[in-house]
Image (tube, helix red, strand yellow):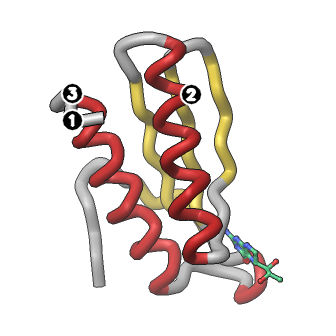
Amino acid sequence: MYEASEWRREGDTIRRTVVARDFRTAIAIVNDIAEQAEALNHHPDIDIRWRTLHLALTTHDAGGLTDLDYKLAARIDAIVADHESGKS
Ligand SMILES: C[C@H](O)[C@H](O)[C@H]1CNC2=NC(N)=NC(=O)C2=N1
């Protein structure tokens, strides 16, 4: 199972904080996450504070964590890496 160091376990959720370079980049990251969330039909909780995103994943339907959470986490990591490296 996928376990990224960026994600921390809190109860029935995994959480990651992302600090983007600016607000526009934070929103662009959210838009990219939205695409993947729709593709997987799995949707993160997202709290936007200026350029900081607090992301939380859990599977409400199952009452805990599932492979879908780790799959979406991996896709979010790829999106964030792309934005950090200036690829998107
Ligand atoms: C009916 C639909 O499949 C469910 O409501 C989906 C939608 N997106 C979801 N997203 C997340 N994160 N957890 C869920 O349990 C969930 N359930």
Q: Are marks 3 and 2 in contact (CB under 8 Å)?
A: no
Whether residue 11 appears in this view of the structure is no
Disc 2 crowd, CA 10 A, few/some/many (<14, 14-19, 20+)? some
Q: Is residue 39 above or below residue 1?
A: above
Mark 3 = which residue? 86
Q: Residue furthest front?
A: 88
Give ligand 1's quarter of the image: bottom right
Mark 2 = which residue? 27
Mark 1 = which residue? 87
**In which image quadrant can residue 63 be found?**
bottom right
Residue found 51% across the figure and 22% down from its top: 52
> Could you say which is closer to the camera, residue 33 or residue 54?
33
Residue 28 lies, in percent from the top left, at: 50, 31
Say what secondary structure mark 3 lies in.
loop
Residue found 68% across the figure and 51% down from its top: 45
Q: Is residue 45 above or below residue 37?
A: above
Amino acid type for the residue under numbered disc 1: Lys
Residue 76 lies, in percent from the top left, at: 40, 54
How far apart are the two marked residues, 1 and 3, measured between alpha carbons? 4 Å
Of the residues under marks 1 and 2, which one precedes in the sequence? 2
Q: Is residue 61 above or below residue 19?
A: below
> Could you say which is closer to the camera, residue 20 or residue 64?
20
Say what secondary structure mark 2 lies in.
helix
**In which image quadrant can residue 70 be found?**
bottom left
Indicate yes or no: mark 3 CB to ligand 1 under 8 Å.
no
